[in-house]
Amino acid sequence: ILVCNAGISPKGPDGPLNVSDLTLEEWNDVLAVNVTGTMLCCRAVLPGMKKSGFGRIILIGSLAGRTRPRIAGASYAASKAALSGLSRVLVSEYGPYGITSNVVAPGRILTPLTGSPESKINVDALARIPAGRLGIPEDVAAVIAFLVSEDAGFVNGAVIDVNGGEFAPS
């Protein structure tokens, strides 16, 4: 089982960096961690998974990679969208060996990184969530626990949104 959950999202003093304010170094740093790091982790575990005939790969995407980002900047949104493409390639190449690859795309989840529920950014996010609450880590963990289980062997190539209904694709 591999769960790729690392990610960085640089911000400026006023929030997300606009494309015109983003340096090439910041862009490359985000892609290096969020995309290249994920690919390298996958590459490290795939031979063993293939040999054993079983594997579960979960890539942690984001609401920002699924729809117009409201909180994240260009590099983060692009990097999280790229994970869906990587997952589709993994499905094609390794599905025949009993290895599944899925993306979990959380919305606003309360963690020390996202700050107090009373912060302006979280209050604004809450107003967009039909479920009437911000997410908690356990919401995401429950989806991951299912996807890595034997019961999820036929779930392959999915992007599962965990966002309380803020984004509901057709």
Image (tube, helix red, strand yellow):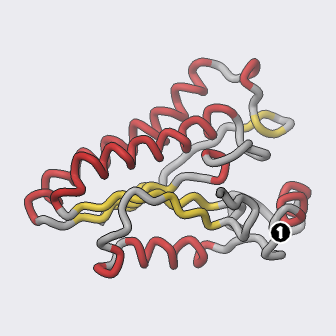
Q: Nearer the viewer, residue 102 or 133?
A: 102
User: Which image quarter holds the C terminus?
Assistant: bottom right
Q: Position of residue 82 (x, y in %)?
A: 49, 39
Identified at 20% across, 64% down, the residue is 98
Give amino acid for label 1: Pro
Q: Nearer the viewer, residue 94 or 28?
A: 94
Q: Position of residue 16 (x, y in %)?
A: 76, 37
Up the image or down, 79 lies above or below 59; here it is above
Disc 1 crowd rating (10 Å Cα; few below 14, some 14-19, many 20+) is some
Identified at 33% across, 43% down, the residue is 89
Q: Quadrant of residue 13?
A: top right
Residue situated furthest front in the rendering:
170
Instruction: Give SS at disc 1.
Output: loop
Which residue is the site of mark 1? 117
Identified at 79% across, 45% down, the residue is 70
User: Which image quarter holds the N terminus?
Assistant: bottom left
Q: Position of residue 151 (x, y in %)?
A: 33, 81
Looking at the image, residue 38 sits to the left or right of residue 17; the answer is left
Looking at the image, residue 100 sits to the left or right of residue 122; the answer is left
Q: Position of residue 166 (x, y in %)?
A: 76, 62
Q: Nearer the viewer, residue 120 or 108?
A: 108
Looking at the image, residue 50 sits to the left or right of residue 104; the answer is left
